[in-house]
Image: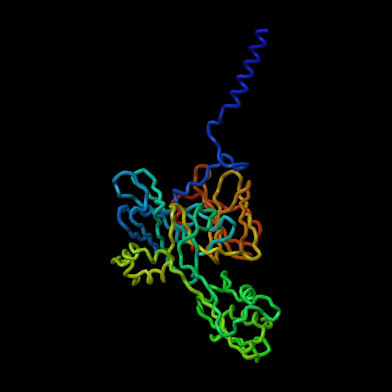
Amino acid sequence: MQKTIFIILTASFLLFSCKDKKPENPIEGSGTNRGLKPFSYESIDVEPIKFTIDNSRDTLVFGKKDFIVYVPAKAFIAKGSNTIIDLYLKEYNNPSDALAQNISNTSLDHHLLAASKVIHLEAKQGMNDLSISPKHDLRIHFKREKAVPEISLWSGHPQAWTAIKFDQPRLFNHRLKTGLYKATRFADESSIEAWENKNLVINKENEEQELWDNQQHLHLDYTINTKGKIEKVVFEEKISTAFQKRILKVMQKYPACKPHLVDGQAQAMQGQYIFHVHQADPKYKKDLNYIHILGKKYPKLAAQKISHIDHLESKYHIFNISKLGWIAAAKEIDSPNPVNLVVNVAPNFLVEVKLMLQKSKIILTGKREGNQISFSDLPKNEAVQIIAFGEKNQQPVLASAKANSSDGIVEQLKFSSSSYQAIKAALKKIK
């Protein structure tokens, strides 16, 4: 009996010991990729610029290439009386820079991001990481490009960017009605104002910007004749926008009106609709400390003949941020008739496979499943360059190939032994 109890206790001890025992070397990843070592980007990443600044003063710092950061006084939450802090900036201005980091120009909802300029900001006081005070924002400036006049701001994970709101000039519009015709209802007793609000509205998604860029004030003349019908509908300004053309078509369906009577006699009456598009100034134009610091003599501003906020605004996109970390300035684009591309790789090492769209210079990082790395929602029939690097048997390796987004499947890449220095040099040649 005692022997039986001993055997049961021993078996139970061994069973629970096996359950509690953890592997000596925790493995990473999942599925067939478990235990494979991820590539270390630190060995090829761009070098940060370090700015030592006084947190008690307004400061303007300049990046390597057409990038400016405005840091207001007390922008960072720091401990103690020491106001000296270090601001670290990494700039990814071209494809070779983005390839040297785990960056993918795609949004969280799988849209491609074109003309992407990526930065990483970090603030420290000694060994302590700092965050931006909730009472302040940093103001960042990206140089404008004629090819991409409008861009948005993105933050978060550098492989799945999320759009963020920012202080910017805002457009708004309204419609006025003038003339002596004061009727509020059509001949069928339906509301004139309701019809106007449904049909004579400036569409904010596209027409508002179009009018702001072309004609911010439009005057539409018309006449209600003695029979109550509308006629002589014409814009005083030359017809040059899609909005004007649409409104003229809409006015052809203007319902019959009640004739305007004077002493019992019907008279023709003239009227006018006035369409306005206005711009509300952003908050930064009212920030006196910001305006003041721009007036100081900075060689990099002087070289661009910038001494006023209006000069700066015409040459730079101006954004405000409330969090440090990864930031991208880019334009979201759609791919008509998108296609997928798969790159096959050997299953015995975890390789980083990236793709660059030759036309737009968009950089994408593939998603791995087993020995396949997939790229989704690519524009159809576009030339691409595939770049792959990793470590095999503790030796850096590199591969490169040209393909087409519509190829479907690219078979295993040909890797050659390399070094971190050689990989970094090879990436710099990609344009």
Q: Is residue 360 left or right of residue 81?
A: right
Please identify the quarter of the rendering in which residue 206 is found. Answer: bottom right
**The one of 11 and 308 positioned closer to us in this rendering:** 308
Q: Is residue 82 left or right of residue 331?
A: left
Q: Is residue 161 above or below residue 206?
A: above
Q: Is residue 152 above or below residue 231?
A: above
**The one of 380 and 199 positioned closer to us in this rendering:** 199
Q: Is residue 249 above or below residue 325?
A: below
- Give the farthest residue toward the right: 188
Residue 204 % position (x, y): 56, 70
Residue 195 % position (x, y): 64, 75
The reply to whether residue 232 is visible in this rendering is yes
The reply to whether residue 239 is visible in this rendering is no
Image quadrant holding the N terminus, namely: top right
Residue 90 % position (x, y): 41, 55
**The one of 158 and 215 positioned closer to us in this rendering:** 215
Q: What's the residue at 59%, 40% (across, down)?
A: 34
**The one of 143 and 420 positioned closer to us in this rendering:** 143
- Give the farthest residue toward the front: 263
Q: What's the residue at 37%, 69% (across, down)?
A: 309
Number of numbered tags placed on the structure image: 0
